[in-house]
Amino acid sequence: MSESKGQRSSGRGRFITFEGGEGTGKSTQIKKLAERLNAARLRTIVTREPGGSPGAEIMRHLVLSGMGKLLGPEAETLLFAAARDDHVRTRIAPALNQGIWVLCDRFADSTRAYQGSLGSVPVGLINAMQRVTIGDLKPDLTIILDLPVEIGLARAAARRGTGTPDRFESEKLSFHQGLREAYRKIATDDPARCVLIDANSDPDTVAGRVWTVLRERLLPTPAPVVSV
Ligand code: Z5A
């Protein structure tokens, strides 16, 4: 891991990740938040995982096509890790170091939920890969969108239309229920970083919940000046 990955300086941008199961509205909400932050004159980029950098986009194609699954859970996890290493090194860390806010659609919690909790990849291996790929680059805030799985899958199916489900969309209902539980546990285990948000409302209502959390956690109003 290069030192710059986890470095924090006073002018560093903020790193916000969005997580959740299928069709919970991550892409929709990230776009709305970027619009709000840009309107507040905070330089912001939106990125995603797997992908987000030219090298990682190649890996994205590989894993979502189902090729990674053929190699087995550990090797598939290594593919996600390789993609993340490139993404962090070439896109996320440089942007944060320039003071730019980075909004990322999925990040390391997706590996913990999908490959760890659901794919039974040992937590020791996941921790080791995380140390190598992201070091101490922890998100400042992780929004976990929570929704009954039937609703999320119906939304994803409606968006897909007649297209073929990808490698994860085609998993059984029990997989998606397990995923929801895994994300809820991640939120409970790290309340300083994660906030679980009810995503079972219209997009603007959910966006309002996200904005309230962001303002409370990352945009505190300045303390009043007290004269003594
Ligand atoms: N993966 C992994 O296994 N390990 C890892 O380490 C990483 C990822 C990083 C990437 O898929 C896959 O890789 C992912 C996990 C795995 N599993 N799958 N599949 P992806 O990037 O192609 O897609 P996704 O991240 O899974 O996105 P999604 O779940 O399909 O969608 P979403 O971003 O959460 O939702 P959306 O696109 O904003 O909305 C879906 C539809 O619902 C759309 O038509 C919207 O207009 C509609 N929508 C959104 N919000 C609402 C509300 N509030 N009400 C009604 N309708 C709404």
Image (cartoon, rainbow, N blue to C red):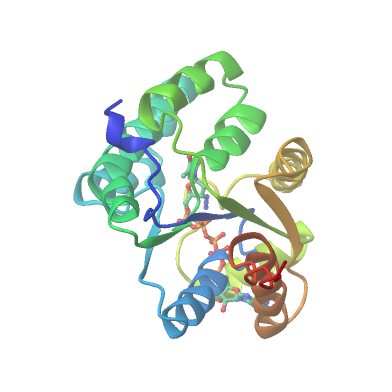
Res 155 → quadrant: bottom right
Residue sitting farthest toward the front: 228
Residue sitting farthest toward the left: 54
Figure quarter occupied by ligand 1: bottom right
Residue drawn at point x = 60 percent, y = 68 percent? 25
Query: In the image, is 135 to the left or to the right of 201?
Result: left
112, 91: nearer the viewer: 91
Indicate the position of residue 75 as horizontal and vertical percent values: 40, 22
Indicate the position of residue 92 as horizontal and vertical percent values: 33, 50
Residue drawn at point x = 71 percent, y = 54 percent? 195
Indicate the position of residue 191 as horizontal and vertical percent values: 74, 44
User: Is 165 drawn above or below residue 203 in the view shown?
Assistant: above
Quarter the N terminus occupies: top left
User: Is 148 drawn above or below residue 87 in the view shown?
Assistant: below
Res 213 → quadrant: bottom right
User: Is 162 drawn above or below residue 88 in the view shown?
Assistant: below
Q: In this orientation, does residue 172 appear?
A: yes
Query: In the image, is 90 to the left or to the right of 85?
Result: left
59, 48: nearer the viewer: 48
Indicate the position of residue 188 as horizontal and vertical percent values: 79, 41
Q: In this orientation, does residue 161 appear?
A: no
Count of marks overlaid on the render = 0
Residue drawn at point x = 52 percent, y = 46 percent? 139
Query: In the image, is 181 to the left or to the right of 6?
Result: right
Quarter the C terminus occupies: bottom right
81, 96: nearer the viewer: 96
User: Is 54 drawn above or below residue 217 in the view shown?
Assistant: above
